[in-house]
Image (cartoon, rainbow, N blue to C red):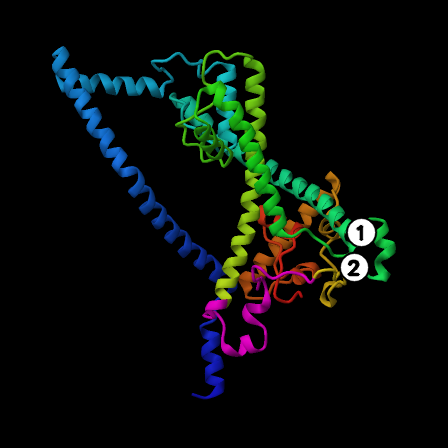
Amino acid sequence: MMPGQRIQGCRSLHINEDNGRFLLLAILIVLYLLCGAAVFSAIERPSELQAHGRWNRTLFNFSETFNISLQDLNSFLREYEAAIAAGIRADTIRPRWDFTGAFYFVGTVVSTIGFGMTTPVTVAGKVFLIFYGLLGCAATILFFNLFLERIITLLAVVMKAVRERRLRHGGLLPPGLRHDFTHGYLPGWKPSVYHVMLILGLGAAVLSCCASAMYTPVEGWAYLDSLYYCFVTFSTIGFGDLVSSQREAYEYQGLYRLANFLFILSGVCCIYSLFNVISIVIKQVLNWMIQRMGCLCCQRCKKNGAFLGRRNAIRPGSRIRRGRLARPANSDGPCDSDTEGRRLSGEMISMHDLTASNRVSLAMMQKQLSESANGFPRTVCGSSRQNGFSGGVGALGIMNNRLAETSNTRT
């Protein structure tokens, strides 16, 4: 085969990097689901069979003792299941649809927790829920993204101060940067995604442990069950098997319900931020796997160091050499806005700047979509090329702009 034919064949087999990452992630998620199903089936299926056996024996014994047919008994149990769905239990619980109960319900709706212990049963309630949840969930996601920006900014300020202190005591600061360093400025520095993930993980663990210490004595749960409830709630999975603040009365009831609300709000925001940081790490692993497989680019592209356009070619584990603060040569290109440059430095931006940045991001997203549809390459600012990844959209874009991903082009 002629060299030209090999190159043409390689180009015909070329897959866009974003599409390749999407397909690889979809395959891995399916495999992850299959493995999870196998594990949970092996763990929980024997317990389910034992519970079915005990329940069938109980029904039979009750039917024999009180001379009630199994058909009548099952009909009674179906009526009780309908009563449970309406919020009626054998144990006394607080009203589901008074103002405080309804407020708890709408909080689980807009946060997407959805415990399921309270659901609308009227047609009007179900129709209103559709429109209410549509706007409420969108607004809450925006709130989570704004919280994500601010928590990353706060961590960036603290981590930059710590790094400045370490460099000052280590004598690793180049002489030309001493003046800027005195004013607390490190050119082009952004916090490491691994360090931010560690801090957020520790914060989520501490918050869950503190909340569990409150739930265990007040709700009467085991401490492990309280930790399980915290993860299920903070991650907005919301099974509903354990739900806090459902009794009719508590000691120091007002204080407990306020603490419960604050713990849930803080926990959901913290876990949401942690999930987005973990998604960046997963993205790095996907890029590393794509690069190792070498199935999306020809050998010529590899030799020229242009694997998949060099965009997002990130390898987990590589780090910046200690003490090196000089900005790479390709990072001098202008960004798409002044606000973006400020955000990359870790500063807190005003609402006016945030609004302007969102307009610029929307215009950039429209431009990128148009270029992708027409087959033209997308362009990113110099700082994005420096870090080896593009801006992205939504929470992923926030994390990409505010955290430093380590690519194989940085040494």
Q: Residue at x 57, y 34 (%)?
A: 206
Residue type highlighted by circle 2:
Leu
Which of disc 2 and disc 1 is earlier in sequence?
A: 2
Residue on which disc 2 sits: 172
Residue 169 spot, x, y in % from top left: 80, 52
x and y percentages locating residue 283 in the rendered image: 53, 55
Depth order, front residue of 16/176: 176
- Which residue in the protein does label 1 denote? 185
Q: Which of 138 and 272 is in front in this view?
A: 272
Residue 349 is drawn in which quadrant? Answer: top right
Q: Residue at x 74, y 42 (%)?
A: 348
Residue under the point 71% across and 56% down: 336
C-alpha separation, residue under disc 1 versus residue under disc 2: 15 Å
Which x, y percent locates residue 98? 48, 13
Type of amino acid under label 1: Tyr
Determine whether the residue tagged by mark 1 lies in a helix, strand or loop.
loop
Residue farthest bottom in this picture: 2
Choose between 365 and 406: the one closer to the eye. 406
Q: Is mark 2 on a helix, strand or loop?
A: loop
Give the vertical position of 122 relative to 53 (above or below). Answer: above
Instruction: Give the residue at the far front of this rendering.
Output: 170
The magenta span reads: 292-321
* Left or right of 180 on screen, residue 250: left
Name the side, left or right, on which 58 lies relative to 178: left
